[in-house]
Amino acid sequence: MDRIDFRSDTVSWPTPAMREAMAHARVGDDVYEEDPTVRRLEDLAAERVGKEAGLFVASGTMGNLAATLVHAGRGDEAILGRESHVFQWEAGGMASLGGVMPHTLENDDDGRMDLDAVEGAVREDDPHLPRTRLLLVENTFGGCGGTALPPEYFAAMREIAERHGLAVHLDGARLFNAAVAQGIDASKLTADVDSVTFCLSKGLCAPVGSVLCGSNEFVAEARRARKRLGGGMRQAGVLAAAGVIALESMISRLAEDHENARLLAEELSGLKGVRVEPSRVQTNIVHFELDASTGLTPEELGRRLQADYGIGMSTYPGNLCRAVTHYWLGKNEVRALVGAVGAILDNR
């Protein structure tokens, strides 16, 4: 990359191996299900998460929405966390395009919903009420700093779902970060969900795309939903080729990103005026805050990092700064960010 950019792992460029694979990809018309590279990606993705089939989609948002359209209908209700990506950052698609009502519950510091609260949120069979059809869960949980939730949490959600006839969909945008952080296979995190989507374009470094996985029957319906959303792509093997490289060679190196994120948190914790808990950093996301004594807002810090040092970093309301590590950021870039933050605080 030509700059230091900690805003997100979505900014990562494709690797040289991905560019080479894209240049030589075998292609066909994917709407006719004739693109061999897309088929290879979908089969590989399904195998990785222990499902029967996969569907290549343009984005995680599209994958989550397509899953919701399959699992629930207009006027139905989905239970999900108030801080979840689907609720906060996907433009209200489930409601505006799917007619599915979100029933939001509080998330704890790790992103979990209280199990009793989830069970209590399931509607009784009453014609005055919407029907509860779907539980939406997330892993890693981005809004809580990329926490990696364990298989037991999803097993408990499965038990609730079975008692009430609900489907469970997992927004696994950074699913493989969660698996690597816990030293387990990703399929252990997806065993108790009906469907899962994961991003190729975040920590796995592909330029675009996600894969939605589930049963053969589910994916057949999701393919129809994808078409309805305008997601039917043609010679998409050019894109899928990078996804194949991502799944074959980029998962095992995610531990490096986690190590660099922990280094970043530890180095930031030594700066006066910065509040961060290194022990909370489990994957590749670091959340930190600025003490009021600094006289700086996160927005001002972000502007100065960009203007004076050419370093990108995300800021959010509520005094939150976020830095995300990825393939193109190593220890030198981590130390550059820490040094720049320290210099700005010293010269405020």
Image (cartoon, grey):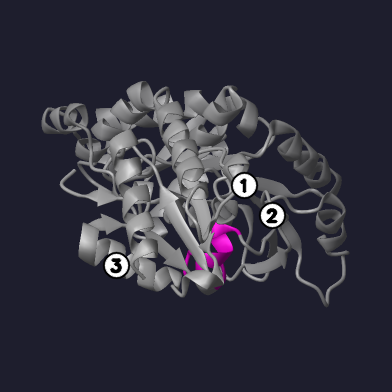
Q: Quick one: 83 or 238, which is closer to the camera?
A: 83
- Residue located at (46% from left, 75% from top): 295
Residues rendered magenta in the picture: 84-95
Of tags 2 and 3, the one toward the viewer is: 3
- Residue 335 visible in rendering: yes
As measured in the structure, the alpha-carbon distance from the residue carrying label 1 to the one carrying label 2 is 7 Å
- Residue under circle 1? 169
Quarter of the figure that contains the C terminus? bottom left
User: Residue 134's mark?
Assistant: 2
Q: Please name the amino acid that badge 2 sits on.
A: Leu
Of tags 1 and 3, the one toward the viewer is: 3
Q: Judging from the image, what secondary structure is the residue with disc 3 in? A: helix
Taking the image as shown, residue 166 lies to the left or right of residue 126, namely: left
Q: Please name the amino acid that badge 3 sits on.
A: Arg
Taking the image as shown, residue 42 lies to the left or right of residue 169, namely: left
Q: Quick one: 37 or 49, which is closer to the camera?
A: 49
Q: In the current view of this chain or complex, which residue is farthest to the bottom?
A: 128
Q: In the current view of this chain or complex, which residue is farthest to the left?
A: 23
Q: Are marks 1 and 2 in contact (CB under 8 Å)?
A: yes
Q: Earlier in the sequence, mark 2 or mark 3?
A: 2
Q: Are marks 1 and 3 in contact (CB under 8 Å)?
A: no
- Residue located at (14% from left, 28% from top): 20
Residue 332 is a magenta residue: no
Q: Residues within 10 Å of mark 3 (few under 14, many from 20)?
A: some
Q: Judging from the image, what secondary structure is the residue with disc 2 in? A: strand
Q: Quick one: 34 or 336, which is closer to the camera?
A: 336
User: Residue 304's mark?
Assistant: 3
